[in-house]
Structure formats: C-alpha cells, structure tokens
Image: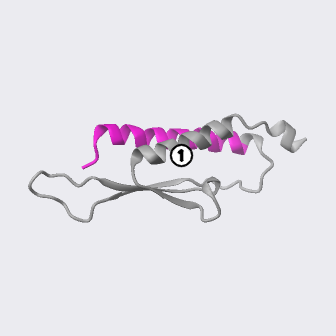
Amino acid sequence: MITIDELAKLKKIQTLMDEAYTHYFENSDGYCKSSEGAVTVGFGTFFDRRDGNSSVEYVEIYSYVFGPDRTNTYSSVDEALKAVTGWHEEEMNRDYTEENG
C-alpha cells in the first residue's frame, strides 16, 4: 500500500517535472517539443494478506532529460524525487538567452 508520504512525494515529482518542462518549452529552441515525462510506480509482486501491505518497489521515470535510454528506474520514491529535484534545479537555472543568442 502506498503511504501518504510517498503519495505526496510522487505529486511533488509530477509538479517539478511539469514546471521544468514548461520552462524548457517556453525558453528553448531545442529539438524536443513533445510533452514527455511519464512516472510509473511498481509494487511488490505479492500482496501480504497478513498485514495488508504491498510496498513501492520502484519508480520509473520516462523522460528525454534523463539520458539516451529515456527511462530510469529508481529503487525508491525518495531516490526518484532526488533525481527530479536535481533536474528541476538545473533546468530552472539554465540561461537560454546565451544558448539561443
């Protein structure tokens, strides 16, 4: 079962990706103008009926910004949030006037 904390962090991942993509699309002359950025959450394969829990086993993010394979898998919501936060910060601080001019 997904926890409230994990749910909040997944929402944060979506928000950060949306903000960073919006910044990129509005400022870049780059080749990628498609709306990418899928987030997949994988759970354990077995549901433990004794305690009712099936925890998050991985978070997969599909996005061109995460490398040539476009898909990266993280072993936890925290790990995925850290990666997306880093990209968000990098993107929001990028000066496209120098790159485009």
Mark 1 crowdedness (10 Å alpha carbons): few <14, some 14-19, many ≥20 = some
> Of helix, strand and loop, which mostly describes the magenta segment?
helix
Residue with the most extreme right position: 101
Residue 17 locus on image (x, y percent): 56, 44
Instruction: Kindly identify the residue that appears in the image at 38 percent across and 56 percent down.
Output: 58
Instruction: Kindly identify the residue that appears in the image at 28 percent across and 47 percent down.
Output: 2
Answer with the quarter of the image where residue 62 lies. bottom right
Horizontal side of residue 90 vs 3, given as left or right: right
Q: Which residue is mark 1?
A: 83
Horizontal side of residue 4 vs 40, given as left or right: left
- The magenta region covers 1-25
Is 13 magenta? The answer is yes
Asked if residue 49 is positioned above or below residue 14 in the image, the reply reads below
**Most foreground residue, 67 or 12:** 67
Residue 69 locus on image (x, y percent): 60, 65
Identify residue type, mark 1. Ala
Instruction: Kindly identify the residue that appears in the image at 52 percent across and 59 percent down.
Output: 72
Is the C terminus in the top left, top right, bottom left or bottom right quadrant? top right
Horizontal side of residue 89 vs 30, given as left or right: left
Q: How many dots with numbers?
A: 1
Residue with the most extreme left position: 50
**Most foreground residue, 29 or 96:** 96
SS label for mark 1: helix
Answer with the quarter of the image where residue 46 lies. bottom left
Instruction: Kindly identify the residue that appears in the image at 54 percent across and 61 percent down.
Output: 71
Asked if residue 19 is positioned above or below residue 77 in the image, the reply reads above
Figure coloring: one colour
